[in-house]
Image: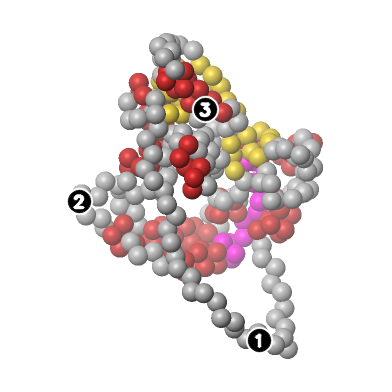
Amino acid sequence: MPWRDLNSTGYQEPSTGPFSVDGKLAADCLQSIPFDARKGTQFVDEFRKFVEWQSTLDVLKNPPSEYLSPATDILGGLDQTQAQAAQSSYDSQTLLYIPLPFFDRPEPGVCLEGRTSSPANIRRRNDAQLLSQGVDNVSAVVTINDRLAVDVLEEFASSQSFQDPDARYRQLFYCPGREVTGNDARGAFAAPSLWPEWTQYEIQFANGTSIQTDIVASLASTFGVFDYTTGRSLLEDKCLVSMSPTNTSSPTPSPSPSPSATATPSPHPPCTPSP
């Protein structure tokens, strides 16, 4: 049983530093969370209310010919998700929500740098630093899990949030300037993400050598004690909202003057990683 194996690792105990376990074990535990069709369909209903504020829904569904990304019918996708939820087509609540813990690649050297999608420009961050110091025999990354590195990265980039394909691709690579905006400088390939369905990454270089790095799951520092023994107990405690009874006798506070709020987009300057 995955929960028994998870608890035997001591994962539930608070620690002074980050604590991680095998990613496949964590994924199995999350996917054991039971699915509730009624709550699943209600979730999509409520989520749609936020999505409908998006002003580009129509143009994303039918983009102009010069648009560089595939058309995306967001509301249609939600309809499909809701229909599958109503039919209990999901084996786990996790497969509907897909938000739960982050999966990480602990080896810092997995962080990549590159200027373009050319294989010759894809290197581990540490190797790229050697190259900038004048070391010539720095080998480029050729394959990831026996697939061309460019293909893996372009597939990974397609899940990033930027509209422009080049921006999505650059988001994968190390960029120290992101720290200014509070983002992860390692880039999306190395930063915590969703379960990739792989237990590890094997990265092979042009000189024939390779490294392996395991995919692990780490507990958010704000999560608290993790003492759950079943998927249902985790669902009920962390995923379901408890409705407190309304106290109708409570007085309504008078509004106090406050400065008007102005929405300001977070700056995100373009960043071109150095080789």
Indicate which label's residue lies in the foreground, 3 or 1: 1
Q: Is residue 217 visible?
A: yes
| Residue 139 in sight here | no
**Residue 168 vs residue 5: left or right?**
left
- The answer to whether mark 3 and mark 1 are in CB contact below 8 A is no
Name the kind of residue labelled 1 in the image.
Thr
Comparing marks 1 and 2, which lies closer to the viewer? 1
Camera-nearest residue between 200 and 107:
107
Q: Earlier in the sequence, mark 1 or mark 2?
A: 2
- In the image, the segment drawn in magenta is 27-40
Q: Determine crowd level at label 2: few under 14, some 14-19, many 20+ residues with C-alpha closer than 10 A.
A: few
x 69%, y 57%: residue: 238
Q: Using the image, tell me which numbered label, if any, was put on residue 262.
A: none
From the viewer's perspective, is the residue at label 3 or at label 2 nearer? 3
Work out whether residue 257 or residue 151 is closer to the camera in this orientation and state it: 257
Q: Earlier in the sequence, mark 3 or mark 2?
A: 2
In percent of width and height, residue 102 lies at 59, 43
Whole-Å distance between the Cαs marked 1 and 2? 54 Å
The structure residue drawn at horizontal position 74% and vertical position 54%, both measured from the top left corner, is 233
* Amino acid on which the number 2 mark rests in the picture: Ser
Q: Is residue 147 left or right of residue 226?
A: left
Which label was assigned to residue 110? 3
Q: Which residue is mark 2?
A: 65
Q: Is residue 104 magenta?
A: no
Mark 3 or 1, nearer chain start = 3
Residue at the spot x=66%, y=62% of the render?
A: 240
Residue behind mark 1: 252
Is residue 208 shown above or below 150? above
Rendered-image quadrant of the N terminus: top right
Position of residue 105 in the picture relative to residue 238 (left or right) = left
Q: How far across and down, in percent of the image, does residue 38 sit?
A: 59, 65
Q: Is residue 33 magenta-colored?
A: yes
